[in-house]
Amino acid sequence: MILQIYNIFAPMNPFTTLSPSQRIAHLDQLQAEHKAMCKKEKALVFSNRPACPFCNQTHVHSVGFRNGINHYRCTSCKKSYSARTGTSFYWIHHRQKFDLYMQDMLTNGHKPLKQMCLKYKISVLTAFDWRHKILAALNCSPKQFKGLIELRNSAYRFSRKGARLSKSSENAPERTSTPVQLLITADYNNNAGINIARIGKLKVSDIEQHLAKRIDQDHVIVSPYSKGIHEFAKTKKLAITTFSERNNPHELDDKKAKELNEKLKLLIIQQTRGVSTKYLDHYSRWAVITYNLLSEQSVKQLKKEIENHNSAWYSYVNIEAIYKQFAVKYSDEDFVQTSHRQWKFANKLKV
Ligand SMILES: [Zn+2]
């Protein structure tokens, strides 16, 4: 019996044999290790929580569930939110229908709004809002283009479609033939993007703004001849091969960029029969994702991207103000407000 008790305390032996100062040092070491472990665990818990959509703070408290959704409170701005706040799903009452609508949009591409209304039993306005809430969450802007980069400048017609239906219709200016300048870029690493560069005559500074940081000097641009693109490559000391689309003896081509441009043309000229320039950026994103020939895997990735995009709702409800900022800076046309819709929390949620 005595022997058994001795055995229980056996593991303590090394500690009990230490001198008082050694014990203190050992305890200090254990305490430090414990503290580091707790910090690591805490960081892991916080990393699983969505960052605050109001101020991007990642140190947030979980404050329990409401309607089956976990809610959080930000330690910095003290605001409460859930994982849905600010995303495309914010204020969506028919989540199941919305999910099906999103799946439909991403896999089947464009379908007329009226067809979507009948299929999902929703109003035209809801179908329109859902479409743009989803498009606002798509990030179709690669950080870098690499290798052989095809770059094309394409001009589309400026449009104020929908202006006649709004209160400002009496003051809306006449139709204009001002072009909207788009930069269409694609490389052979599955990177593709469309940028709305200017309404009016394209400037070299517009191309620089969108592409200077995304094309490094050891890559090559292939482009149908355009004065702006040529000058951009020259000032940035980028290698460029240009060709004339009419007279092209070496049969140089920008196959991918041209194909992407055709996708966009099909979408905004034939399928939607013209879109307001205000929404052109959204439709460009749609063209990019349909161009990428979506596999089931990439639809899943896109859905995840949409779920995590916590400023999509803000971007959509403030689209008029965002477009105004662009028009003031990069347009030869006057800005005319075409929508007077008010959203209850549009200005509260600043991201
Ligand atoms: Zn916050």
Image: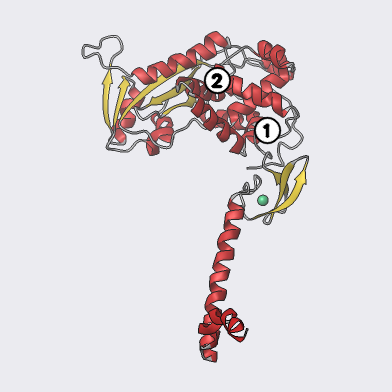
User: Relative to the observer, which residue lies in front, 184 or 115?
Assistant: 115
The answer to whether residue 52 is left or right of residue 296 is right
Where residue 19 appears, as percent x and y from the top left, is 52, 91
Viewer-side residue, 317 vs 161: 317
Q: Which mark is residue 126?
A: none
Q: Nearer the viewer, residue 216 or 115?
A: 115
Q: Residue at label 1?
A: 89
Q: Which label's residue is closer to the chain start, 1 or 2? A: 1
* Identity of the residue furthest to the left in this view: 250
Residue 320, image x, y percentages? 65, 28
Residue 218 found in image quarter: top left
**In the displayed structure, does residue 56 sit left or right of residue 293?**
right
Secondary structure under tag 1 reads loop
The quadrant of the picture occupied by the C terminus is: top right
Give the image location of residue 79, x and y in percent.
Answer: 72, 50
The amino acid marked with disc number 2 is Thr
Q: Is residue 285 above or below residue 63?
A: above
Report the label total.
2
Residue at x-position 48% and y-position 23%: 294
Can the viewer see residue 336? Answer: no
Rendered-image quadrant of the N terminus: bottom right
Could you classify mark 2 by the number of other residues whose Cα lies within 10 Å: few (under 14), some (14-19), or many (20 or more)?
some
In the structure shown, which secondary structural element does the residue marked by tag 2 occupy? helix
Residue 141 visible (yes or no): yes
Residue pointed to by mark 2: 107
344 left or right of 311 in image: right
To which quarter of the image does residue 149 belong? top left
Colour setup of the view? secondary structure
Q: Residue at x 54, y 30 (%)?
A: 300
